[in-house]
Image (tube, rainbow, N blue to C red):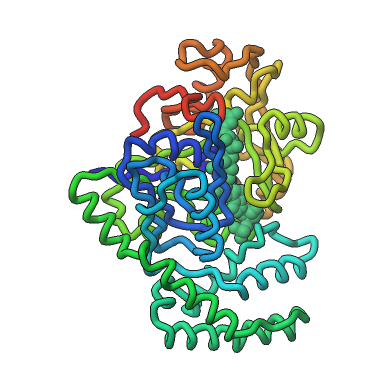
Amino acid sequence: MPAITLVGAQWGDEGKGKATDLVGNRVDYVVRYQGGNNAGHTVVIGDQKYALHLLPSGILSPDVVPVIANGVVIDPAVLFEELRGLQERGVNTERLLVSANAHLIMPYHRALDKVSERFLGKGKIGTTGRGIGPTYADKISRAGVRVQDTFDPKILRKKIELALNDKNQILTKVFNRRGLDAEQIIEEYLGYADLLRPYVADTSLVLNQALDEGKTVFLEGSQGTLLDIDHGTYPFVTSSSPTSGGACAGAGIGPTRITKVIGILKAYTTRVGSGPFPTELLDEQGEWLRQQGGEYGVTTGRNRRCGWVDAPLARYATRVNGITDFFLTKMDVLSGLERIPVCVGYDVDGERWDEIPMTQTDFHHATPVYEYFDGWNEDISHVRSFEELPKNAQAYVRTLEEMAGAQISAIGVGPGRDQTLELRSLV
Ligand code: GDP
Ligand code: IMO
Ligand code: MG
């Protein structure tokens, strides 16, 4: 009966893929509801490592139905490449369902994403260059191309020709780039129709029927709360709604179906791309976190910016998502620190703030106010219960729990599926 939502509580890369995979054998459907192949989710099962971008992490669990819902933007070439990669490794991908209403990333979206970033110069967002922003922009301005359009050659042709009317003007006259050939794009995208057809479904109907039958639907967010188009550090955000509210619109289910919201919170903070990040460490301490935590992007290979955990940020995530449970990941990475700083508030031009400042200008000026907690030296990656954790690690968890405003129900002590302490059942 329940729908359970999983959201990133920071700026992405909190370990959502691992968390989703962990519950994969206990749920019936795993649904991506927003974003596209800007995401990079690493799942480690035994000695096998998988990097997923567009496919729901549940695809690796044999009994789950993975769903790409209406709120996702799909680059079809990437979709089929990712499917092929998994098939070659023996993963059965036949169960996948793709919404007929999901929008398609087109070659001109990728071109515009890259060129507009280049023109922003120092003001660039640092996007993944996958065409995400321009695709969502076209969706909102009602000029998008959807999965179902590939089934209607006349409509597909009309939409692509219309889109190129102005996209080519912009590419050539504003950005001084070469225009794109309509016929080539039409041919490519018509070619996807037969490949897509076996997967395409009315996914909102399927999910609602499943819920009526008492099945469990797990809604897997990508990106994170602070990258949300409404609730993130705008304009340094992605162009969709990773927050739990976005799960309803993006999957076509009502809010009354959702019984639990799991926030994935990393024991420290990272961010990729531009934008404010008060606890960022630009010194050797940041480099230490990057190396200990392996903080290099799964999608673009960029170094992730690293810093200490930020309690007001976690509290904010609890608030805007209605988080009921946290999964605290990467606790093992903090082993070996004499003391661990936790940001408990901000100093904004001499004024103390306990919550994220209302305006972006103030947030840009925010410097963290820290409290310090005693660290631990033990390697905790083999620990399997809360009681086995060093006392100082237990205290760190309890402190974060109190500051973040929701119970911590699971703790990650390594990338593996089994390297998890489940304090209470997540699903
Ligand atoms: P996502 O985008 O939220 O799915 O996260 P990413 O996969 O981009 O980044 C998280 C990284 O941390 C991946 O390499 C995971 O394998 C790894 N990871 C997840 N949980 C843990 C944990 O508890 N400890 C350690 N050491 N690594 C973890
Ligand atoms: P997962 O799901 C971290 C960031 C980009 C950039 C901004 C906008 O792995 O947590 P976009 O290409 O979406 O228009 O880029 O958002 N970004 C992510 N950062 N993890 C992600 O996904 C991200 N997806 C997008 O770096 O700053
Ligand atoms: Mg990631």
Residue 209 seen from this side: yes
Which residue appears farthest toward the left when viewing the image?
A: 213
Q: Could you tell me which quadrant the C terminus lies in?
A: top left
Residue 169: image x %, image y %?
68, 87
Q: Which residue is drawn at 27% across and 58% down?
A: 206
Depth check, front residue: 267 or 155:
155
Q: Residue at x 43, y 53 (%)?
A: 32
Depth check, front residue: 421 or 391:
421
In the displayed structure, does residue 31 sit left or right of residue 270? left
Residue 82: image x %, image y %?
53, 54
Q: Could you tell me which quadrant the N terminus lies in?
A: top left
Above or below, 125 against 296 in this view is below
Residue 233 seen from this side: no
Depth check, front residue: 196 or 426:
196
Depth check, front residue: 25 or 272:
25
- Where, by quadrant of the figure, is residue 267 drawn? top right
Q: Which residue is drawn at 59% across and 81% down?
A: 184
Above or below, 276 against 132 in this view is above
Residue 111: image x %, image y %?
67, 72
In the displayed structure, does residue 301 sit left or right of residue 215? right
Q: Which residue is drawn at 66% across and 48% down?
A: 363
In the displayed structure, does residue 69 sit left or right of residue 259? right
- Where, by quadrant of the figure, is residue 421 drawn? top left
Residue 191: image x %, image y %?
49, 75
